[in-house]
């Protein structure tokens, strides 16, 4: 277990106990299940009886899914530092489970946020979707955030930051569209096969294009139970990394969604979408801090045990230097991601302020995922031939790390958007 450098957290017994409890879950249950799922066919992972569901059930039994949710809704109303600690520990065991927990928490937190924006008028959504999810301790409910579509991905990030007149010519017309029909909105279209938790989720915070369907500016937000008639799931994606958390397409075929589950506010997508992405990106920083730490600790353990040149690897100065470099990267990730996570959490969920400089959060995701990949790569190098074996933990960590440069926004696109934000908001006075 790492030494806490933040003095205020180091002296907080509740945070220390939370960290210890989640780490015990990570060691005993989450990592072993993660390694087992990594070797399974993607479709086996999502089948009934898969160990996948046991892992998420244990996460729910600890109440970790309630951390974002305020006490008035039955949640824990955890601090951003507490949530960050949990995300890091879960991702230390499994980047997949960390990502699954992240989208599950965020999906339902969006309902809470939307209810705040709408002045507390979303009673049906809160009672029908949020409350049963909060009370769940058996893994009956799991949320996801199907925002992207096969035709486009990270370009949606740019759309959140462009003037409406530019978006109109940007070529972004969300394929999932809705049309009014009495007290329902009828959904048609397909969400991308890289929707995290898509094959196993029971609900989704869906971005859908509303009439007149002219551009992404017409998009709005809906919360869709996936047991509605006409919702279908595609096969689980066979992918490079994060194989312990399934991804897959979600198809809407004349799905009648009650109007109470759709939030119709002009321009909502640009402000809310960019804000949620900022929170997800800073959360990705926390998750990839956990992955980077896992890779560093595997390398440190191996270097202490492996004898080369007549002495343990760690007694070679060059290996010490490489481990020190990995350690610095992990600590930098933790410090940056904690700050970015707390900043976006305060703006979005406390101040209910959706218009704020988001570049710091986009850059956080870029920095932490790139550092995690560097650390995981170095961990393989220190392991040598053992590091490239499929039985090696660092081999899995390396594949999971590579996923981070694409998930929740391609790093190149996020860097560009962060640059816009810096230019607009950074004062030299």
Image (cartoon, helix red, strand yellow):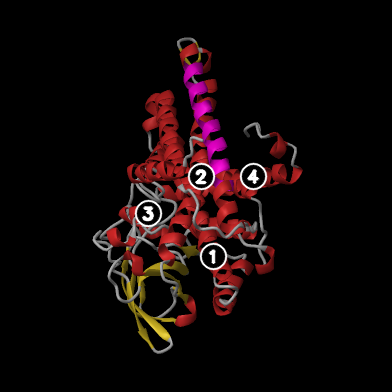
Q: Which residue is mark 3?
A: 161
Question: Are there few (<14), some (14-19), or many (20+) residues within 10 Å of tag 3?
Answer: some
Q: What x and y, as percent, mark residue 159?
A: 34, 57
Labels 2 and 4: the sequence-earlier one: 4
Q: Which residues are magenta?
A: 319-342
| Circle nearer the viewer, 2 or 4 | 2
The residue located at (58%, 44%) in the rendering is 89
Counting residues from the N terminus, which is met first, the one under dot 1 or under dot 2?
1
How packed mark 4 is, by other alpha carbons closer than 10 Å (few <14, some 14-19, many 20 or more), is few
Q: Mark 1 or mark 3, which is nearer the start of the sequence?
A: 1
Residues at marks 1 and 4, CA–CA distance in whole angstroms: 26 Å
For residue 76, above or below residue 381: below
Which residue carries the number 2 mark? Answer: 287
Say whether marks 1 and 2 touch (CB < 8 Å).
Answer: no
Give the labeled residue for mark 1.
Answer: 108
Q: Earlier in the sequence, mark 3 or mark 2?
A: 3
């Amino acid at each position: 277990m790492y030494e806490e450098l933040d003095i205020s957290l180091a002296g907080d017994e509740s945070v220390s106990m939370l960290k210890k409890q989640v780490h015990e879950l990570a060691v005993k249950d989450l990592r072993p299940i993660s390694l087992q799922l990594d070797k399974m066919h993607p479709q086996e992972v999502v089948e009934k009886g898969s160990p996948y569901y046991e892992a998420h059930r244990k996460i729910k039994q600890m109440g970790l899914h309630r951390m974002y949710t305020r006490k008035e809704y039955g949640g824990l109303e955890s601090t951003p530092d507490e949530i960050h600690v949990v995300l890091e520990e879960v991702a230390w065991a499994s980047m997949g489970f960390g990502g699954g927990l992240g989208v599950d928490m965020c999906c339902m937190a969006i309902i809470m946020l939307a209810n705040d924006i709408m002045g507390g008028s979303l009673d049906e959504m809160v009672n029908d979707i949020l409350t049963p999810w909060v009370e769940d301790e058996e893994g009956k409910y799991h949320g996801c955030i199907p925002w992207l579509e096969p035709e486009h991905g990270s370009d949606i990030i740019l759309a959140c930051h462009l003037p409406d007149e530019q978006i109109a010519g940007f070529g972004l017309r969300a394929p999932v569209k809705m049309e009014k029909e009495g007290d329902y909105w009828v959904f048609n279209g397909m969400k991308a096969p890289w929707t995290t938790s898509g094959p196993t989720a029971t609900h989704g915070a869906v971005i859908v294009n509303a009439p007149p369907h002219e551009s992404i500016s017409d998009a709005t937000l809906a919360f869709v139970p996936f047991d509605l008639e006409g919702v279908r799931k595609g096969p689980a994606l066979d992918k490079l990394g994060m194989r312990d958390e399934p991804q897959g397409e979600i198809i809407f075929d004349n799905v009648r969604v009650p109007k109470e589950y759709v939030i119709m506010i002009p321009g909502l997508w640009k402000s809310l979408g960019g804000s949620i992405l900022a929170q997800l990106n800073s959360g990705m920083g926390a998750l990839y801090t956990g992955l980077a730490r896992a890779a560093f600790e595997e390398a440190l353990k191996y270097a202490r045990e492996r004898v080369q040149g007549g002495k343990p690897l760690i007694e070679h100065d060059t290996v010490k230097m490489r481990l020190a470099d990995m350690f610095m990267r992990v600590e930098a990730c933790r410090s940056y991601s904690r700050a970015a996570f707390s900043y976006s959490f305060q703006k979005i969920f406390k101040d209910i302020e959706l218009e704020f400089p988001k570049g710091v959060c986009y850059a956080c995701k870029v920095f932490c995922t790139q550092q995690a990949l560097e650390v995981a790569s170095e961990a393989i190098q220190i392991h040598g031939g053992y590091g490239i074996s499929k039985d090696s933990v660092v081999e899995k960590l390396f594949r999971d790390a590579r996923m981070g440069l694409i998930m929740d926004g391609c790093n190149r696109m996020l860097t560009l958007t962060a640059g816009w934000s810096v230019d607009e908001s950074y004062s030299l006075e």
